[in-house]
Amino acid sequence: MKEKVILAYSGGLDTTAVIPWLKEHFDYEVICCCVNCGQGNELDGLEERAKISGASKLYIEDIVDDFCDNYIMPCVKADAVYENKYLLGTSMARPAIVKKLVEIARKEGASAICHGATGKGNDQIRFELGIMALAPDLKIIAPWRMTDLWTFQSREDEMEYCRQKGINLPFSADSSYSRDRNLWHISHEGLELEDPANEPNYKHMLVLGVTPEDAPDQPEYVTMTFEAGVPTSVNGQKMKVSDIIRKLNELGGKHGIGIVDIVENRVVGMKSRGVYETPGGTILMEAHRQLEELVLDRATMDVKKDMGNRMAQIVYEGKWFTPLREAVQAFVESTQKYVTGEVKFKLYKGNIIKAGTTSPYSLYNESLASFTTGDLYDHHDASGFITLFGLPLKVRAMKMAELKAEEKKNA
């Protein structure tokens, strides 16, 4: 009886060519698993394609709600943004996909999992760290690093290999952007983006929306509600998180929201340029920040900012299944109890503009904040506070003056 391998299958040319390659070099029974994180019509025709390429079975697993509730929302609550720009669309999806691959591997009694990530990117790390954490006994096959066996140098090579195996596929040899899509975002790499000196060809590139220049000339107001940090409605319509993201994608794409051009530092040590479209995610994270401003105290916000940066690094580096991620997430969750209220903003040509925020747990006190004197604040109290708050500065300045006087005296 042949050993089984679970192939993380996207339906693209690379992972389709992997199917006959695995059978030729390892004599595996190949079981494909495509995990649906909301990539839309990319799932069309997968079963037929996998079968004619030699797979014995194809699983298409819908984890959209799990992805939104258990991977996206912890990062939204943490305000986890990598290097100030990247909203972790691919990074968040990988552990969700790995968990499902391991589940299918156990169900099928497979001895290995194969992924199609290249040897230069971050995804190989994310896939393999996840598998090591959840199923350390399973073998991991990474064709792109097995250059003695995986000898293809181009899409044309992969297509010719498939033709030699009697597999005719509806792929083109044309070069295009390297893309990754799910409900949260779509990423673009390659072509003119490989030179940071080039301006992105947005007319050719964008999938989820338009540029700010091409957005409507009229702004659009949007109202959202949150309960304990979780979005619950858009414009008065209650929805689950996945549907809220879909609605915000529609609104954000229309108004040119969430287009980011970044040169990021990959885990493997190189810099990489990409353009990310995250229209709904950008709106959701900004709305969440807008509400937190009203309800979190200064000290908590300060520490939470550090934890958000740490969470972004953890997720980006593929360390989701670690005690550290659990600990950081537990802290973040403890800050969300009172992140409840309504956020209003308007969308206009790439901008998200505040239009009012309310919460039953708001710490904003008009009597304190007003320029007119209120009952809760005595201006005289500030004198003692400033004396004590600035005492270390005063003591150091006195000591420095003393030392300077001694130097002058001894000169």
Image (cartoon, rainbow, N blue to C red):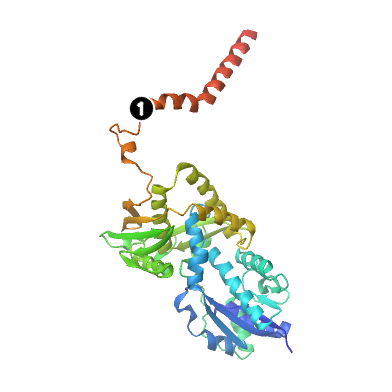
Of all residues shown, which one is farthest toward the left?
Answer: 218
Estimate the x, y position of residue 285 in percent, counting from the top left.
43, 57
Quadrant location of the C terminus? top right
Q: Above or below — where is 197 with respect to 4? A: above
Crowding at mark 1 (Cα within 10 Å: few <14, some 14-19, many 20+): few
Res. 179 in view: no
Report the residue that reaches farthest toward the front: 375
Q: Is residue 160 left or right of residue 279?
A: right
* Residue at figure coordinates x 59%, y 55% from the top left: 327
Residue at 59% in and 58% down:
326
Residue 409 spot, x, y in % from top left: 62, 8
From where the camera sits, is residue 277 visible?
yes
Residue at far top of view: 409
Q: Nearer the viewer, residue 21 or 360?
A: 360
Q: Residue furthest bottom?
A: 166
* Coordinates of residue 338 in the picture (x, y in percent): 43, 53
Q: Up-down: is 293 above or below 245?
A: above
Q: Looking at the image, how many numbered discs can be counted on the residues?
A: 1
Residue at label 1?
379
Residue 289 is left or right of residue 139, and the answer is: left
Q: Quadrant of residue 279?
A: bottom left
Which of the two residues, 165 or 130, is positioned nearer the viewer here?
130
Residues 128 and 272: in front is 128
Residue type, numbered disc 1: His
Out of 331 and 145, give the one closest to the viewer: 331
Would residue 279 appear left or right of 405 to someone viewing this image?
left
Residue occupying image coordinates x 47% and y 62%? 276
* Relative to 3, residue 135 above or below: above
Q: Is residue 222 left or right of residue 108?
A: left
Measured from the top left, where is residue 178 in percent x and y? 52, 69
For label 1, the SS is loop
Point out the image quarter for the N terminus: bottom right
